[in-house]
Image (tube, rainbow, N blue to C red):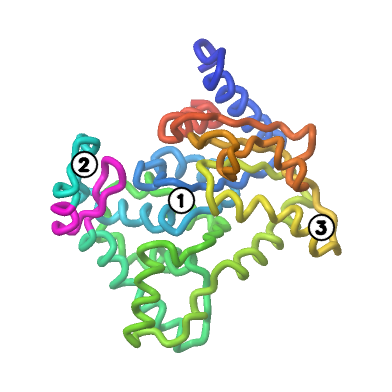
Amino acid sequence: MERNFRHFNSAELLDAARAYKSHCDSGGKMLLSMAGAMSTAELGISLAEMIRQDKIHAICTTGANLEEDIFNLVAHKHYKMVRNYRDLTPADEEELMKAGLNRVTDTAIPEEEAMRKIERHLLPLWQAHERNRQPAPPHEYLYELIRSGELEKYHQIDPKDSWLTAACEKDLPIFVPGWADSSLGNYFVAAHANGQIHDLSIVSEDFEYMMRLINWYRIQSQHSKIGFFQIGGGIAGDFPICVVPLINQDIQKYDVPLWAYFCQISDSTTSYGSYSGAVPNEKITWGKLAPDTPRFMIESDATIVAPLLFSYVMDK
């Protein structure tokens, strides 16, 4: 990278990687926000090691990425690769659907071996928490399932390549806004509709997560500068980055420092009203970043550049 990445997006990537490494080396903490289909793209191969090496200290992710990492852990050998996905006709797509294969670009996730397998193990956990009146956020149910050891007999990849397993081992704070927009979230609502779950509040969501994020940021920022590394756009990025103005401008009882580093990997078209394509400078006006905050916008494919940046940060 240092030899070849000198211009344009490659230079931005190298600058962002250097600044990330410097941030961590000086004792800074980093929150990762992750949208897109990064788990199905097997970003866990590099992301899990970043977590184990304490280069990531909290994650805000979509419900899809949360569940798709564990789907890959238990059903990888049943996945179907569709390299010619650009050539598929609507009829071809329907055949995949009839075969129980849910396509994500070039990767089809097997519904029975992935979704249904995990759902069968989660339902008893939800019901037990309901009986004991112990609500928990979505990720903690998956942590509980991983720690139970029940999934070990299903492992089809090395668990070292599962970022959720690494996060579970570290008890990493995870925030999952909009969890209902996921396969497991859909199944939870279906279980309620079918009378298997009666109390929807046993899975706590956005407001509980925001309070947890407020507390995490307040405590961590007392001792460390906190950076924000964003893959993709959407709710995974918009939800956590607003915690700073929420504390400073809305709660008004505390004064926390702004985010100390910002980088986004995105292929969204810049601006035109797109939150995902908003340049980092716009965040200054919202009280999220300071004028001197190191900030970077890598306009590229995250499946290519994120592992490169992670490798650089880990001195590989």
Q: Earlier in the sequence, mark 1 or mark 2?
A: 2
Crowding at dot 1, Cα within 10 Å, few <14 / some 14-19 / many 20+, comes out as: many
Q: Is residue 97 magenta?
A: yes
The residue singled out by tag 2 in the image is: 81
Please report the residue visible at 41 percent of the width from the left and 78 percent of the height from the top.
Answer: 126
Residue 224 seen in render: no
Left or right, 158 with reference to 87: right
Q: Is residue 26 above or below residue 77?
A: above
Q: Nearer the viewer, residue 266 or 120?
A: 266
C-alpha span from label 2 to label 3 = 48 Å
Label number found at residue 234 = none
Q: Nearer the viewer, mark 3 or mark 1?
A: 3
Crowding at dot 2, Cα within 10 Å, few <14 / some 14-19 / many 20+, comes out as: some
Residue 189 seen in render: yes
Please report the residue visible at 51 percent of the width from the left and 86 percent of the height from the top.
Answer: 133
Amino acid at dot 1: Ala
Q: Nearer the viewer, residue 53 or 111?
A: 111
Left or right, 269 with reference to 111: right
Amino acid at dot 3: Gln
**Mark 3: secondary structure:** helix
Q: Is residue 296 above or below residue 133?
A: above
The residue singled out by tag 1 in the image is: 166
Q: Position of residue 292 (x, y in %)?
A: 79, 32
Q: Position of residue 231 (x, y in %)?
A: 52, 41
Q: Which stretch did the figure color magenta?
A: 94-110
Amino acid at dot 2: Met
The residue singled out by tag 3 in the image is: 249
